[in-house]
Image (cartoon, grey):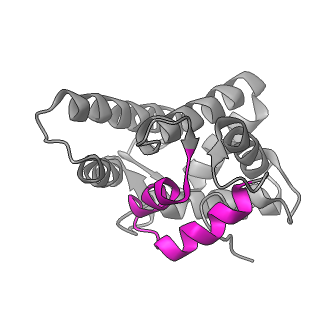
């Protein structure tokens, strides 16, 4: 059973992915994020890099749809999203695979200088592809940079993910991964 804090965090996560604000996450939301990533990387639609990105994003959408679209209407509403995450969080193997995949994708897409870390500008790019403000990204980045060295390591991001998904401490910095959660 999801706690109240988890519901608030996962609802915020849903809102971030619901790019067009229509109350459901569907393929068009993933397509929009993919287009923003393509622009960020400055790659053409026919490039190998774009085709790899497209496969990854469409694959992620298809995995989510298959696991969460209970009513098979082609989209995932908030109730389906929360049920998907409840099931994921109850299954340790599935949960760890999800957190690892999300972390890997974040580093693959946003570690643009390929130094193995996410810097403040790269974190702003992460927020930017979802249409979130850079000022918010910079504020959240400071909170997530656990050792305050000016970058977020893969280990810090894994810990952030664990705090976000499974944590129930209202003061944990990981709660902010996708921005502030509602009260």
Q: Which residues are magenta?
A: 118-145
In percent of the image, x 35 and y 48: which residue is there? 30
**Quick check: 182 left or right of 101?**
right
Q: How many numbered dots are placed on residues in this image?
A: 0
Residue 174 visible at all: yes
Q: Main secondary structure of the magenta part?
A: helix
Q: Is residue 66 magenta?
A: no
Which image quarter: residue 21? bottom left
Q: Is residue 119 magenta?
A: yes
Residue nearer the viewer, 63 or 172: 172
Residue 95: percent from the left, percent from the top? 70, 31
Which image quarter: residue 44? top left
**Quick check: 114 left or right of 159?**
left
Residue nearer the viewer, 3 or 50: 50
Q: Is residue 132 above or below residue 29?
A: below
Residue 7: percent from the left, percent from the top? 72, 59
Q: Is residue 110 above or below residue 36?
A: above
Q: Quadrant of the C terminus?
A: bottom right
**Quick check: 64 left or right of 152?**
left
In percent of the image, x 78 and y 53: which residue is there? 146
Residue 7 visible at all: no
In percent of the image, x 42 and y 61: which residue is there? 130
In percent of the image, x 75 and y 57: which residue is there? 148
The single residue placed furthest to the top in the displayed view is: 93
Residue 5: percent from the left, percent from the top? 79, 62
Residue nearer the viewer, 99 or 20: 99
């Amino acid at each position: 059973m999801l706690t109240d804090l988890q519901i608030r965090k996962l609802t915020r996560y849903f809102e971030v992915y619901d790019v067009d604000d229509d109350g459901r996450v569907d393929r068009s939301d993933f397509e929009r994020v993919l287009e923003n990533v393509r622009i960020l990387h400055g790659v053409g639609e026919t490039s190998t890099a774009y085709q790899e990105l497209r496969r990854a994003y469409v694959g992620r959408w298809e995995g989510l749809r298959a696991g969460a679209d209970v009513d098979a209407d082609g989209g995932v509403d908030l109730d389906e999203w929360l049920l998907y995450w409840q099931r994921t969080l109850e299954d340790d193997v599935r949960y760890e695979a999800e957190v690892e995949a999300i972390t890997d994708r974040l580093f693959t897409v946003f570690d643009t200088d390929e130094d193995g870390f996410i810097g403040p500008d790269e974190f702003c790019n992460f927020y930017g592809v979802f249409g979130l403000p850079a000022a918010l990204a910079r504020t959240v980045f400071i909170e997530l940079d656990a050792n305050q060295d000016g970058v977020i390591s893969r280990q810090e991001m894994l810990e952030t993910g664990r705090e976000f998904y499974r944590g129930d401490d209202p003061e944990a910095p990981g709660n902010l991964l996708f921005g502030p959660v509602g009260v």
